[in-house]
Image (cartoon, helix red, strand yellow):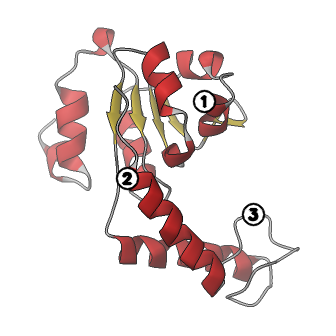
Amino acid sequence: MGSMCFRKAAALYCALVMAAPAQARDKIFFIGPMKTGTTSLAAMYTARGYRACHGECNGQPWHTASTSRAAKAIVDSHDTFMDHGDHANFKWLAKSYPTARFVLNTRELKSWLISRADHARRNRVAGHCAPFGDKCPAASSNFVSNSNETIASWARAQARHQMQPAPT
């Protein structure tokens, strides 16, 4: 435990994981957006023996399943959920899993926008498209738009998300 508590996202990891015995794990939903430490969180939970769902679980995005209320099999087969949590149906998850923990993972808006735009840029370049723009048909990912209009829409969506009340 000692060295894990000094790594990236360590305070959150130590507070949420190390304090709970393995047999008494509640579901943990990270309800922040992509590009907020979700890869590091997934690696830390997996290393601790948790069944982490990072983005897709069983071939389906967990946040999409939670909004369609088809999440029971996915949620029951995993312990922690992260990446695109800002699209999850928090109210349904809280009602269905009353002992679950909800964590709003976030980061400063400017660095988040830069990171997200850069993620799209990498996908665009890998698909042999210009670094910035809207469409890139040859890209293997559908996350390729990083135009000024798209970036502005991300900022507006993030502001709306952070104004939502937490599940009760």
Residue drawn where x is 29% and y is 10% of the image: 24
In the rendered image, is residue 48 in sight?
no
Residue type at numbered disc 2: Met
In percent of width and height, residue 134 lies at 76, 80
Disc 1 packing (10 Å; few <14; some 14–19; many ≥20): many
Q: Quadrant of residue 97?
A: top left
- Farthest residue toward the left? 2
Disc 2 packing (10 Å; few <14; some 14–19; many ≥20): few
For marks 2 and 1, give the one nearer the viewer: 2
SS label for mark 1: helix
Distance, label 2 to label 3, CA atoms, is 29 Å
Residue hosting label 2? 163
Where is 126 relative to 17, above or below?
below
SS label for mark 3: loop
Distance, label 1 to label 3, CA atoms, is 22 Å
For marks 1 and 3, give the one nearer the viewer: 1
**CB atoms of marks 2 and 3 within 8 Å:** no
Residue hosting label 1? 66
Residue drawn where x is 69% and y is 22% of the image: 70
